[in-house]
Amino acid sequence: MKKTILGLVAALFVGQGAMAQSTPEITYVEDPSQGYLFNRFQDNWFISGEGGINYMFGSGNKARNFWDRFSPNAGIWVGKWFSPLAGFRGGANFTRLKGLGHHGDYGYYGTFEGYNKYHVNEFSINLDGMLNLTNWWCGYRPGRVYNGILYAGVGYDFQFLPSAQGGSWSDSWAHGGGDQLTGHVGLINNFNITKNFAVYLDVRAGLYGVNFDGYRAGKNIDLQAYLGVTYTFNKATWNAPVVAVIPEIPDCSPLEAQLQAAAAQIANLEGQLRDCLNRPVQVVEQAAEGPLCTIYYTIGSSAINRVDRKVLGAVAEVMKANPNQKYVVTGWADNYTGTDQVNDRLRKARAAGVEKVLLRNGVPASQLDVTTNNGNLNDMGVKMVSLDRAVTITKK
């Protein structure tokens, strides 16, 4: 009898050990499709150095030889990205501008077909706002090589020019009196070599006010091209929300076989197992037909991420396969946060965004009825407000 009890106890411990070893381990990973978190303040700072050429479209300059209108420029920048989309930078820039005149006054350094040639050295302090177009249009991806970055900014320009006719290079740095506020806009074509190091081609248009021997007609447009390098300090990528990954439940057949072997010796355990296996199946009433699709948003956002665009592409194929079926696209926002005006704008923007994606995927506008609902989609309380920030697509 004692041997039988010891055997049963040993069998139970073996079964519990097998169950503990087969328990799946939950892991946690960053998932960019769930939205983005801002990094620490000390991350995503960068420094850039660049050099290139410029070509000015100024008054009187059109008479000049094409190749003689190019001049050098250079710059150095320090900046920070606050998110995958938005950043700023500040820096110093040197630009030499060339022009034509008749009087041989300040800035003169030679002649060309009856004109006197002039140059002015411009040293400016600039501040720019930047928008990463690639991340905006295509979604953030850590390993992307190319990024197109649109920027615009203003600067304060200090002019230096030769102090007399035919001035030397050292004379060229005599401070003139044409200091001014300037503006510029450009596109940085950025190529990532490593996580922290990149090279880029910057194409820029600057607006300058320069007087070349009386030839001054408002502002002069200067086209510039730079080749540069950028180094990003600390972390250059972006944190994403952490989600739980539950692995697939393993095959439990071996464990069931062990329990059945133990049940052969323990009548009590065998009866419990038989009762468990013979449990009646719970009958679940089929719920009413729900939405064809529901797209969820983060608070205050109407942006559609890359994953949801793929989902809407599949929904569009279903709609096109049923051309006689009409669908209602309804925009929702939670009524627990934000003002009525903000929530109404979010509902309309979310519904319009989904409609735009469906139309781009070939769904006729006649199949869609776009509307909003100022109630809560689920109305399950303030703890469940994430379920109320959505767009639903239902059959009409």
Image (cartoon, grey):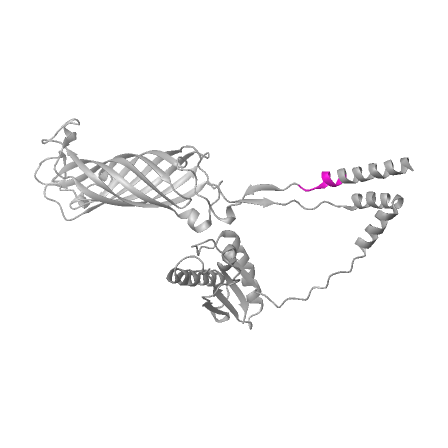
Q: Left or right of 122: which side holds 348?
A: right
Quadrant of the rendered image containing residue 255: top right
Image x and y of residue 73, in percent: 26, 35
Nearer to the camera, 146 or 38: 38
Image x and y of residue 90, in percent: 29, 38
Q: Left or right of 18: which side holds 90?
A: left
Picture layout, residue 116 above or below residue 329 = above
Q: Residue lying furthest right in this view?
A: 1
Numbered range of the magenta stretch? 18-24
Q: Which quarter of the image is occupied by the C terminus? A: bottom right
Quadrant of the rendered image containing residue 371: bottom left
Q: Left or right of 239: which side holds 91?
A: left
Q: Which quarter of the image is occupied by the N terminus? A: top right
Q: Number of callouts in the render?
A: 0
Query: Which residue is drawn at the image coordinates 78% and 60% (left, top)?
Result: 280
Decide whether the magenta segment is chiefly helix, strand or loop: helix
Picture layout, residue 144 above or below residue 347 = above
Task: Determine if the magenta segment contains residue 66.
Answer: no
Image x and y of residue 248, in percent: 67, 46
Image x and y of residue 239, in percent: 48, 41
Query: Which residue is drawn at the image coordinates 38% and 60% (left, top)?
Result: 339
Nearer to the camera, 6 or 362: 6
Nearer to the camera, 275 or 360: 275
